[in-house]
Image: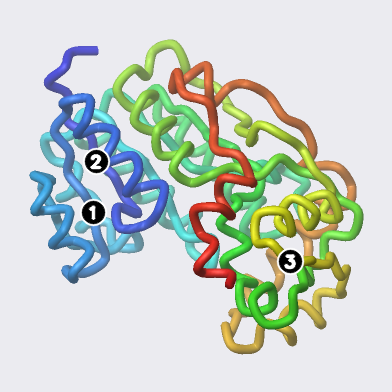
Amino acid sequence: MEKQIKVLITGATGKSGGAAIDELLKMGYPVRALVHQPDERSARLAAKGVEVVAGDLLNLDDITAAMQGIDTAYLCYPVLVPGVLQATAYFAIAAKENGLKGIVNMSQISARREAKSNAAQDHWAGEQLLNATGIPSVHLRPTFFDDWFLYIRDLIRENNEIALPFGNGRWAPVDSADLGRVVAKVATNITPYAGQILRLYGPQEYSLAEMAAVISGELGRTIRYQPVTIAQFFECNAKRPASEHFIQHVTHVAEDCVNGVFAGTNDLIETITGQQPETLSHFFRKNKAVFS
């Protein structure tokens, strides 16, 4: 695709969206960022030369306006709140009306028709909607992010404990910055990936007991893995209130994780970005102060 294509990034003040913007700017592409509301984070984007617009992914008029003059777009809807299917439907309509040349869609590894998680099933349904537009669409299905550990940082910092409801499940943690680089590369070169589901993994698969050993080495103290029930997990993290939607999602992706849905690894991130993905060790090394 030509260098002058313009990319719309949603979730622009989030981690993968922010990393995608940084990579696009480095590559020399013009970027428009859709943010929920102007704040210090959006001001920093504007200072980098990003065109910032405010809007709601659950408002069709907002999305339609944000897509005017855009060539390709990245859809990233937060898993913490319901509405991904509605947002995806609006995104599909607006993309069709504005003649977009490509869509990069952030889905999830557990997205499938038979998923028990409402969010995971809605992500799968959203993939079908985007494919039906006829616009070249690419669906990113990452496994769990290493950023998940930030959700339980208080337990790690105060109790030296990883308390998660994932049993003996295994996965290769993905870093959000690597996801952002994938978004930038794919959004500016849709053709080779059009219609594909890209399963994205970190460089090494672990059990949680193995992750605890890695984390212990980086933090310089013993971190234990403590398997817990869903109820215990949210009780342990009562400082961070969770919606019924999020509880339902975690309940069923925990089952998926135990059943091997999140397991595996590949070199797709490195192949697409030309850069080795970040390791779990490096994630904890660079965030050591947060967990200490």
Which residue type carries mark 1?
Leu
Helix, strand or loop at disc 3?
Answer: loop
Query: How far is the residue under mark 1 from the one under mark 3?
Result: 41 Å
Q: Compare marks 1 and 3 and give the one earlier in the sequence.
A: 1
Camera-nearest residue between 182 and 206: 206
- Establish if 120 lies above or below 162: above
Give neighbour class at mark 2: few <14, some 14-19, many 20+ (Cα, 10 Å): many
Disc 1 designates what residue?
Answer: 34
Look at the numbered discs 1 and 2 and tell me whether their residues touch, using CB distance below 8 Å. Answer: yes
Query: How far is the residue under mark 3 from the one under mark 2?
Result: 43 Å
Give neighbour class at mark 3: few <14, some 14-19, many 20+ (Cα, 10 Å): few
User: Image quarter for residue 23?
Assistant: top left
Q: Compare marks 3 and 2 and give the one earlier in the sequence.
A: 2
Residue 241 x, y percent position in the rendering: 58, 85
Residue plotted at (55% across, 52% down): 285
Q: Residue furthest front?
A: 220
Residue 180 x, y percent position in the rendering: 40, 39
Please tell me the numbered disc located at residue 221: 3
Please tell me the numbered disc located at residue 8: 2
